[in-house]
Image (tube, rainbow, N blue to C red):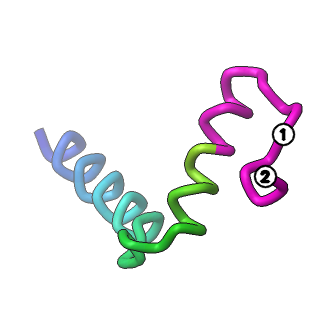
């Protein structure tokens, strides 16, 4: 049980460090779209070039 709690705490720490307060930022939103398409194998266009 202690290991489960430790892993949960570590995951929360990692996620908190990766999150942003810039939820209204167009740039952050568009980077998310680019990363999603890249993950799916689409690399023809970048949103910043459109």
Residue located 30% across and 47% down the image? 7
Residue located 17% across and 49% down the image? 5
Residue located 68% across and 44% down the image? 34
Image x and y of residue 46, in percent: 80, 47
Instruction: Say if 7 sits above or below 10 in the image.
Output: above
Residue 14 versus residue 29: which sits nearer the camera? 29
- Disc sitting over residue 19 in the figure: none
Position of the N terminus, as image quadrant, is: top left
Dot 1 falls on a residue whose secondary structure is: loop
Query: In the rendered structure, which segment of residues is drawn in magenta?
Result: 34-50
Residue 31 versus residue 17: which sits nearer the camera? 31
Residue 44 versus residue 17: which sits nearer the camera? 44
Image x and y of residue 39, in percent: 68, 29
Q: Is residue 40 magenta?
A: yes
Residue located 38% across and 58% down the image? 15
Dot 2 falls on a residue whose secondary structure is: loop
Disc 2: CA contacts within 10 A as few (<14), some (14-19) or many (>=20):
few
Q: Are marks 1 and 2 in contact (CB under 8 Å)?
A: yes
Per the image, the residue denoted by label 1 is: 45
Image x and y of residue 33, in percent: 59, 44
Per the image, the residue denoted by label 2 is: 50
Which of the marked residues, 1 or 2, is nearer the chain's N terminus?
A: 1
């Amino acid at each position: 049980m202690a290991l489960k709690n430790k892993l949960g705490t570590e995951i929360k720490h990692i996620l908190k460090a990766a999150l942003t307060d810039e939820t209204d930022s167009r740039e952050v939103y568009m980077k998310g779209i680019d990363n999603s398409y890249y993950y799916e194998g689409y690399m023809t266009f970048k949103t910043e070039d459109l």
